[in-house]
Image: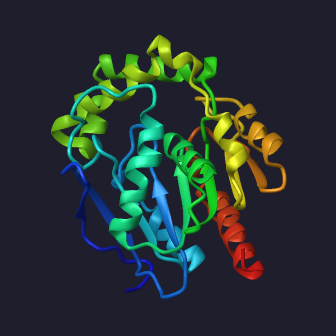
Amino acid sequence: MDARQKTEARFLTLADGSRLEYRWWGYPKPGEPVLMLLHEGLGCVDMWRDFPQRLAAATGLAVFVYSRLGYGRSDPFDGPLDVDFMHREALDVLPQVLDGAGIEQVFLAGHSDGASIALIYAGERSDPRVRGLVLLAPHLFVEPETLHGIRQARALFEQGKLGPRLARYHGDHTDSTFKCWCDIWLDERFETWNIEESVPGIRVPLLAIMGDADEYGTLKQIEQIREIVPDCTELAVLGDCGHSPHLQQPEKTLERVGDFIRSLARTGA
């Protein structure tokens, strides 16, 4: 299959019976890693838009994308999220997805919450299948900017300005998707959420990309990663860019990610 083409949506079944939608862009080649994309807090397969296709073309690797429980065409949430929801996604669900998709080598590429999930998994699991990380606007801890951005999103949703846009992707469970995401981030228990303790366990190269005008956090997020694991970390700060580098500065993001992946291929990392 040409890297520019994608398969139709398919479904993986988890141990608890939940179904998650997934898609491939390109086919994995024997002995080569796969790029797995982990979406943001309100994302899903389709909300990556054409980025998976372009990423496959830029790197020559197959790209695997799935929607977490509660998002896109995956089954809806079965209840509210708890403070440890990203750890559960990383340590319980993600290995099931890797196994179910038959992925033997992988670069985990996450955006926002998805980047945090990738970081937790790499730092706490030491899975030899993981070759490297690409973190787009990751969260390590909660900042005032984070909460301000989420409160603004809540206001737009309550005004009826955000819901219709999200409904194109999340369908009948749009309200529960938004409520679960918003409620846990604005829960007072979540103010002390912090995953810095996961970072020292990272043993693979990582590229952290963030916009200089990110409305959900400051550059302290990625600078702290470099402070903790300087030998593993490469940072890229994109100008005129907010919280979604892959959509707001796609050319620069693809260039940096492509260079990062190719450099690892050259060194055999």
Q: Is residue 153 visible?
A: no
As drawn, 67 above or below 261: above
- Left or right relative to 180: residue 251: right
Give the x, y percent position of residue 219. 74, 34
| Residue sitting nearer the eye, 183 or 50 | 183
- Left or right relative to 81: residue 139: right
Q: Quadrant of the C terminus?
A: bottom right
Q: Residue at x 63, y 49 (%)?
A: 123
Q: Is residue 206 visible?
A: yes
Give the x, y percent position of residue 150. 48, 23
- Left or right relative to 269: residue 24: left
Give the x, y percent position of residue 263. 75, 74
| Residue sitting nearer the eye, 44 or 20 | 20
Q: Residue furthest top?
A: 188
As drawn, 146 above or below 51: above
Q: Quadrant of the N terminus?
A: bottom left
Give the tally of numbered discs.
0
Q: Quadrant of residue 159?
A: top left
Q: Quadrant of residue 133?
A: bottom right
Q: Residue furthest left?
A: 172
Give the x, y percent position of residue 165. 30, 37
Q: Residue at x 44, y 15 (%)?
A: 187
